[in-house]
Image (spheres, rainbow, N blue to C red):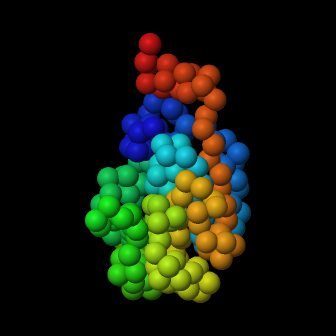
Amino acid sequence: MPGSNSSSESKTGHRWSIIGHAPVIRLLDRALTTGHLAHAYLLIGPPHVGKSTLSINMAQAVNCQENAPPCGMCPQCRRIAQGQHADVQFLGVEEVSGHKSISIDSVRDLQRQAFLKPFEGRSRVIIIDGAEFLSDQAANAILKLLEEPPPQVLMILLATDTNLVLPTIQSRCHLLHLRPLPETQVMEALTTYWEVP
């Protein structure tokens, strides 16, 4: 699914870039409307199911300047979609000598950033892609951040399997499961929104 919110907005006619996953979107919409968004979410699902797209949408939603976030069109939403927003940090997996992990050094840098006030938006957003690859030290550092979250910080962890993420981290996040879409829904999206034969 495309990461660009502006193109998806014009073609799909809805605020969220992600296709499908209606129960998850309803839950997030309700949390945004009532002001009860959790401080940390763990998005679980197989590769290419929409976890990254949803995390970007969530970052847009908490920084959007319009009444029905995420609008995808305001300067905040656009900068986040383009990966140029100062308050949205991505942390991914590093591969060293064939071994994949998220290092403690990367997490320590993230910790320092988390305690800074938002620079250009309302909220700082930390997206950790591949939470199952956190080293033991890195996982413990993230745990401290989850236990005592700084104000105005939203943490979003992405992982493929709940069982691969430490139970202590899971217990401090709101879990959102993204499951593969039915084939009929994928076909309908391709033909309706992208005019694929």
- Give the vertical position of 181 relative to 88 (above or below): above
Q: Nearer the viewer, residue 77 or 156?
A: 156
- Give the vertical position of 93 relative to 117 (above or below): above
In the image, is 126 to the left or to the right of 46?
left
Q: Nearer the viewer, residue 50 or 8?
A: 50
Residue 36 falls in image quadrant: bottom right
- Which residue is rendered at x = 59% and y = 86% of the image? 148
Q: Which quarter shows the N terminus?
A: top left
Q: Is residue 148 visible?
A: yes
Residue 82 image point, x, y percent: 32, 53
Residue 99 image point, x, y percent: 36, 65
- Which residue is rendered at x = 52% and y = 64% of the image? 132
Residue 20 image point, x, y percent: 61, 37
Q: Nearer the viewer, residue 124 or 34?
A: 124
- Give the vertical position of 72 relative to 120 (above or below): above
In the image, is 111 to the left or to the right of 149?
left
